[in-house]
């Protein structure tokens, strides 16, 4: 059974960099044809797709965040990571990692979510 | 403003049927598979429907999906109080290379 778990600081100061990791268990992050994805959800609001990284390392980012976002793979730790630079209060949200399966064009596996608050 | 439009809320009595719509452009809903997610309070979204009308293993057949033109619909029959949740549709926007979601619909089982 594939499981994903987010980890990282829960509090980040404005203008600094938000960094989160997603540890994958139950399967290798470098095998198969999956999109390792980050999605966020501000309190009381809907889902916002941040971006994804393919097994090969190729990435796609939401144009609204592209200039501030980077997603990377760490196959030695079976993790993928998210960095968002120059954060502000609008980046406060629950951040989810998920595995995108192109065969079904959907996200079957999700992490439990990590709340990140941007505040001084 | 979400690219995919959902009603903010729907409600129905236990045992009844409800439908939730998801409308978008022809380049999104019309040309790509729609997926549906259920989000219970305080939990991560859960996949209910993929490829517009297929259910993952373990999802009861009370949940169904369909599409017509530029709209997709999630149907839930035999409503239970445990179905009270937020429901989101999602699809791939090939023009922007981005996954888009609807704004979400809150289901209340009266």
Image (tube, grey):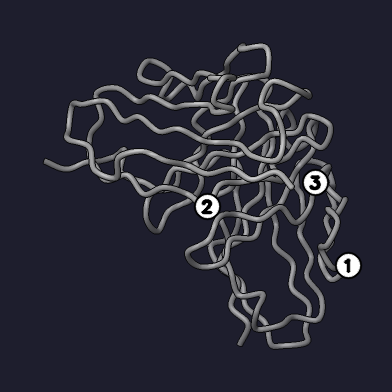
Q: Which residue is mark 1?
A: B61
Tell me what residue is drawn at x 31 percent, y 30 percent. Answer: A18
Looking at the image, can residue B1 be seen?
no
Q: Within 10 angstroms of label 1, few (less than 14), some, or many (20 or more) residues?
A: few
* Disc 3 secondary structure class: loop
Mark 2 vs mark 3: same chain? no
Q: Is residue A78 above or below residue A46?
A: above
Mark 1 vs mark 2: same chain? no
Give the mark nearer the N terminus: 3 vs 1: 3
Chain containing the residue with disc 2: A
Q: Mark 2 and mark 3 in contact? Answer it, CB < 8 Å.
A: no
Q: Position of residue B89 (x, y in %)?
A: 66, 49
Q: Position of residue B3 (x, y in %)?
A: 57, 38
Please identify, in this view, whether the residue under mark 2 or under mark 3 is nearer the observer.
2
Q: Which residue is mark 2?
A: A112
Q: Position of residue A71 (x, y in %)?
A: 48, 21
Q: Position of residue B47 (x, y in %)?
A: 71, 52
């Amino acid at each position: 059974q594939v499981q994903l778990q987010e980890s990282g600081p829960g509090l980040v100061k404005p203008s600094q960099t938000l960094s989160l990791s997603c540890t994958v268990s139950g399967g290798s992050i470098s095998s198969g044809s999956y999109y390792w994805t980050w999605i966020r959800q501000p309190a009381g609001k809907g889902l916002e797709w941040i971006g994804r990284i393919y097994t090969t390392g190729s990435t796609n980012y939401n144009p609204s965040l592209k200039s501030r976002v980077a997603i990377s793979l760490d196959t030695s730790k079976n993790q993928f990571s998210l960095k968002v630079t120059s954060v502000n209060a609008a980046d406060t949200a629950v951040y989810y990692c998920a595995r995108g399966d192109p065969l079904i064009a959907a996200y079957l596996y999700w992490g439990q979510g990590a709340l990140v608050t941007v505040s001084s | 403003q979400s690219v995919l439009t959902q009603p903010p809320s729907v409600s129905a009595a236990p045992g009844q049927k409800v439908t939730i719509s998801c409308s978008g452009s022809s380049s999104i809903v019309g040309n790509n598979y729609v997926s549906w997610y259920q989000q219970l309070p305080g939990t991560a979204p859960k996949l209910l429907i993929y490829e517009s009308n297929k259910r993952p293993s373990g999802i009861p057949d009370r949940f169904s999906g369909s599409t017509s033109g530029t709209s997709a619909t999630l149907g839930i029959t035999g409503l239970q109080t445990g179905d009270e949740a937020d429901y989101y549709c999602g699809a791939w926007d090939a023009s922007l290379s981005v996954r888009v979601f609807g704004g979400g619909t809150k289901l209340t089982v009266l």
